[in-house]
Image (cartoon, rainbow, N blue to C red):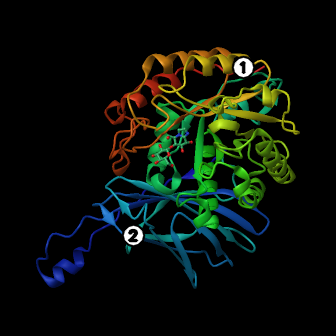
Amino acid sequence: MKRIVALLATCATAVGLTALLGPQPAAAAAGCKVDYTVTSQWQGGFQAGVKITNLGDPVTGWTLKFTLPDSGQKLVQGWNATWSQSGSTVSAAGIDWNRTLATGASTDLGFVGSFTGSNPKPSAFTLNGVACTGSVEDPGTDPNPGTGTPVAVNGQLHVCGVNLCNQYNRPIQLRGMSTHGIQWFSKCYNSASLDALAKDWKSDLLRIAMYVQEDGYETDPAGFTSRVNSLVDMAEARGMYALIDFHTLTPGDPNYNLDRAKTFFASVAARNAAKKNVVYEIANEPNGVSWTAIKNYAEQVIPVIRAADPDAVIIVGTRGWSSLGVSDGSSETEVVNNPVNATNIMYAFHFYAASHKDNYRATVSRAASKLPLFVTEFGTVSATGGGTMDRSSTTAWLDLLDQLKISYANWTYSDANESSAALKPGTCDGTDYSSSGVLTESGALIKSRISTADSFPTS
Ligand code: IDC
């Protein structure tokens, strides 16, 4: 379906200038490649992804420029860079977390544009003034995530009974990774790292942890909304599901963020309604708050999502840091006896293997026959996110989740300097996300579990 006209570009250095001026200090090698892809198009508008690959020496600080075709195209809004338009020239300048591009490193930008008449591709891509020519996709084609990917096989998900079910109405288990806070670790989520996650890890899903506090969403709602949308697209392009995690943590009462949640989910649900790969997680870890208050929050946020995206699965956090109440001395019965008044929803359960053991596993075993559960976050370590990995408890947990077909996402696909991270510190400054040398002890264990064959039912 997808017709790619590949025009790989390398860029020449300024030979003529050297001849004029005599010997110069060794010039930095320059070179760049741009992949421009129209990811969707509608009447008068389109969305495009722009992947920049630096083929020259490392750069710190860059500006991409390109020329819009002479057909009334205009930049409406862009993300992952500072965007502007002057005449027909569009500029996108790197921002704090992607301004450094190592040799071979890529970064993904995107923008929404408007057009009248036809919608030909932009031209004359340059990076820091050096010409790049990209591999260009014909506009208007459908982004085909490819056959055999988790999304291609399973399609739109829904809840059936206590299970997560695929388009054939058959229970499935999704196994994947959570980002770290995207306000801190954006540099870890790029083309190379997500390629590795989809292809080497065979991850079925990417959980996008958008903190609300701690320098997160509340500081820049539009910016974080764009960044989440861009990660949804990057997951979709690789056939992975995307869990949009409204990562509330402190304060623990989700009602503190009720207005923000309504604004955020109205926007992402409208924008992503047509996609099959989106699942909404409305409150990461309620804590210090009753189940009644959480339920009340859920019953206000869920209708906002449903109004825009009626068929998506929605996951509700539970009391005591999404422990089904256990960490607060309660149990799953408070949910069983007083469920959220909505359909097509699941309940979140979180655990950290070194801290949460037999009594938590017993809770999940009991609850799994009564409530649709999704382990949207777990760690192999202690609840601090650090400490020693507990291999035997992690294995017991994952065996249980496999047996019950409960989907999960591991905290974290990042190079954070803490033992829960799957990648060694410094990994995200480089370009290698595939070799075993970049994995921590936790990363190696989790990759070995996630990368086994899925065998999703197809009839
Ligand atoms: C932790 C991070 C850590 C960060 C801290 C504060 O690993 O780097 O400093 O948050 O925001 C959770 C939370 C999750 C925590 C994680 C580990 O959902 O945000 O991440 N954890 O403490 N619940 C239980 C454990």
Q: CA distance from mark 2 to mark 1?
A: 46 Å
Q: Amino acid at mark 2?
A: Trp
Q: Amino acid at mark 1?
A: Pro
Task: Please tell me how crowded label 1 is: few (under 14), some (14-19), or many (20+) other residues with Cα within 10 Å.
Answer: some
Task: Please tell me how crowded label 2 is: few (under 14), some (14-19), or many (20+) other residues with Cα within 10 Å.
Answer: some
Figure label count: 2
User: Foreground: 171 or 401?
Assistant: 401
Position of residue 439 measured from the top left corner of the image (x, y, whole percent): 37, 33
Reading the image, the residue beneath label 1 is 457
User: From where the camera sits, is residue 21 visible?
Assistant: yes
Q: Is residue 369 above or below residue 100?
A: above
Q: Respond yes or no on whether mark 1 lies under 8 Å from ligand 1.
A: no
Position of residue 328 measured from the top left corner of the image (x, y, whole percent): 65, 33
Quarter of the C terminus within the rendering = top right
User: Foreground: 251 or 93?
Assistant: 251
Position of residue 231 measured from the top left corner of the image (x, y, whole percent): 58, 51
Q: Is residue 337 left or right of residue 120?
A: right
Position of residue 363 measured from the top left corner of the image (x, y, whole percent): 67, 20
User: From where the camera sits, is residue 314 visible?
Assistant: no
Residue 192's image quarter?
A: top left
Q: Residue at x 78, y 57 (%)?
A: 270
Reading the image, the residue beneath label 2 is 62
* Badge number at residue 1: none
Mark 2: secondary structure: loop
Quarter of the N terminus within the rendering = top right
